[in-house]
Amino acid sequence: MPALDSPALGQLFTEARTHYGWSDTPVTESDLRALYDLAKMGPTSANCSPARFVFCRSDAARADLAACVTANNKAKVLAAPVTAIIGFDLDFADRLPELFPHTDARPWFADPQVARDTAFRNSSLQGGYFILAARALGWDTGPMSGFDKAAVDARFWAGTRVETNFICSLGRGNGEGLFPRLPRLAFEEAARLL
């Protein structure tokens, strides 16, 4: 498989930014389905696919979510055409006979702590795939972790075994409020060769 060219790498990584201001370009149900269908293809442990998504599109849903976020994130949630809640299903193993038919993998996750760690870790991966898939499809994103998890869980996952991992606004960024590109750690600061 050939490497992506510089413009593609720029769209996914080097030129992409976390957005805080949004245009009024709508994100349709069709757009969200296409985004999910791309993001779901990223690998997870035993294909466990524990991520669950709520797309807050309506004014009411965005207001409900805005009531659960920190003060500096309220305007972002209210302004974005969509804010996704990326959750993790603690009962993900129930779907393994369908998702991983090679063997019965459910016993691998019988320990509640193993199941929680696996669900959180792999939903984090899927959230990263979601961001990259959005960028690949021409959308901008604004991931956030400033929210009251218990409040989001109660409002959006009540009656389930799904918990919130993080939230991510989605749409066409308008460039407002962008910071200058922030530094990243050098290879020598973050990696070791053994």
Image: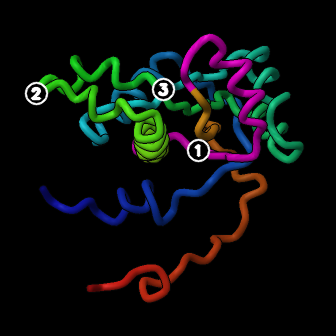
Res 136 visible: yes
Q: Residue 157 lies in what quarter of the image?
A: top right
Which is nearer the N-term, disc 3 or disc 2? 3
Badge count: 3
- Is 135 inside the magenta-drawn segment? yes
Q: Which residues are magenta?
A: 134-162
Residue that mark 3 sits on = 89
> Residue 109, relative to residue 180: is it above or below?
above
Image x and y of residue 106, in percent: 27, 26
Q: Residue furthest right?
A: 71
Neighbour tally class for label 2: few under 14, some 14-19, many 20 plus, Cα within 10 Å: few
Q: Residue 50 lies in what quarter of the image?
A: top left
Residue drawn at x 75%, y 46% as measured from the top left = 146
- 59 left or right of 103? right
Q: Which quarter of the rendering shows the C terminus? A: bottom left
> Residue 102, relative to residue 190: is it above or below?
above
The type of residue carrying mark 3 is Asp
Tell me how far mark 1 sits from mark 2, CA to CA.
Answer: 36 Å
Residue that mark 2 sits on = 102
Residue that mark 1 sits on = 141
The type of residue carrying mark 1 is Thr
**CB of mark 1 within 8 Å of CB of mark 3?**
no
